[in-house]
Image (spheres, helix red, strand yellow):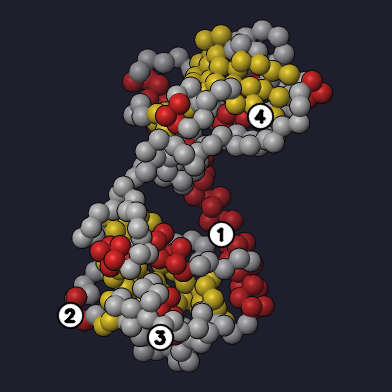
Amino acid sequence: MKYNSYRVLMIAAIAMIAGCSKLDYKKTKSGLLYKVIATSDTKGELAKPGNILKLYFQRKLNDSVLDNNYGKMPSYVTVQATTQGNDYSPSELFTMVKKGDSAVSVILIDSLVKKGLMPTLPPFMKKGDRIIVSFKVKDLFTSDSLARADNMNEEILDQGRQQKEMAGEKTKEDKEIQDFLAANKIDAQKTSNGVYYVISNPGTGLQADSGRIASMNYRGTTFKGQTFDTNMDSSFHHTGAYQFPVGAHSVIPGLDEGVRFLKKGGKAKFYVPAVLAYGPNPVVQGGKPYENLIFEIELVDVKDKSETPKTQGLKIDTTQRKK
């Protein structure tokens, strides 16, 4: 099990606790505003360096909620030794809490910039903004083995939660795609797994079957028409046909299934439900999770594996999508 760094969590996990007045906050040595909400009915010692905290957290920037892990997989964080006052992160609070306690901290963007902790602001932040991080200590472990055992149990529970969530999303996404197709008078067919497709040219030659190497040009857009990734536009940092082994999980599941309907030279448009695409991960900055996507594909080549130099099987680059 790999424990989370709370400096990463500090940037990723943002939240606000309603009703906490600014006058109630104290300051750490680094100037971090904070408040610890002790649980009166829970006894125990404060966390010490080396202990492992089992945390639930929420994320919010100003008044905009980003996400949280309440009701989902908890985070496990190792308590580090007390800093010298230059940390300016919620990790400064870890030795102030015990099992059952909650805490909230206010991180000022201006202070992050001044301290050199955020020299470049992301596009969705500006000076004067506040990052408010809150967390609740669900449990405290004094040894790595105890934390690992608990983590394994939570992973089993989380698998069940994810399956239920995915099942609900799949039904919702299928209806959204059907409504979109009907509204735009698009006559599409459906694969066994729920990908809708329209083939404009089936192609000729080799079929893009599992085990063969396909090369394609592609454009991915949202249902609102925003292009988030393509290899046909130099502004997206990668051009030229993308080569991948079919059936080797080198592209998202929806495309891995869809391209098998095509041969060399084939062209098609695929309407991919989010559960077969990027799931809870937004494809554009500030986008929504579980977003259905459209892919326009042209298979420029299909070869047997024996004919092709060894491929690295990289996934479509989604780390440099256009913002």
Which corner quadrant of the image does residue 57 belong to?
Answer: bottom left
* In-image side of 267 versus 236 (left or right): right
Question: Gap between marks 1 and 2, in whole Å?
Answer: 38 Å
Question: Residue, x 19% and y 76% (percent of image)?
Answer: 21
Residue linked to disc 3: 96
Question: Residue, x 67% and y 78% (percent of image)?
Answer: 145
* In-image side of 293 versus 125 (left or right): right
Question: Gap between marks 3 and 1, in whole Å?
Answer: 29 Å
Looking at marks 4 and 1 on the same chain, the residue that comes earlier in the sequence is marked by 1
Residue linked to disc 2: 23
Type of amino acid under label 2:
Leu
Mark 2 Cα shell of 10 Å, populated few (<14), some (14-19), many (≥20): few
Residue linked to disc 1: 158
Q: Classify 44 as above or below 147.
A: below
Type of amino acid under label 4:
Phe
Type of amino acid under label 3:
Met
Looking at marks 3 and 1 on the same chain, the residue that comes earlier in the sequence is marked by 3
* In-image side of 89 versus 195 (left or right): left
Residue 281 visible in the snapshot: yes
Type of amino acid under label 1:
Asp
Question: Gap between marks 4 and 2, in whole Å?
Answer: 58 Å
Q: Classify 116 as above or below 218.
A: below
Question: Residue, x 61% and y 73% (percent of image)?
Answer: 150
Mark 3 Cα shell of 10 Å, populated few (<14), some (14-19), many (≥20): some
Q: Nearer the viewer, mark 1 or mark 2?
A: 2
Residue 70 visible in the snapshot: no
| x and y percentages locating residue 18 in the rendered image | 24, 69
Q: Nearer the viewer, mark 4 or mark 1?
A: 4
Location of the N terminus by quadrant is bottom right
Residue linked to disc 4: 244
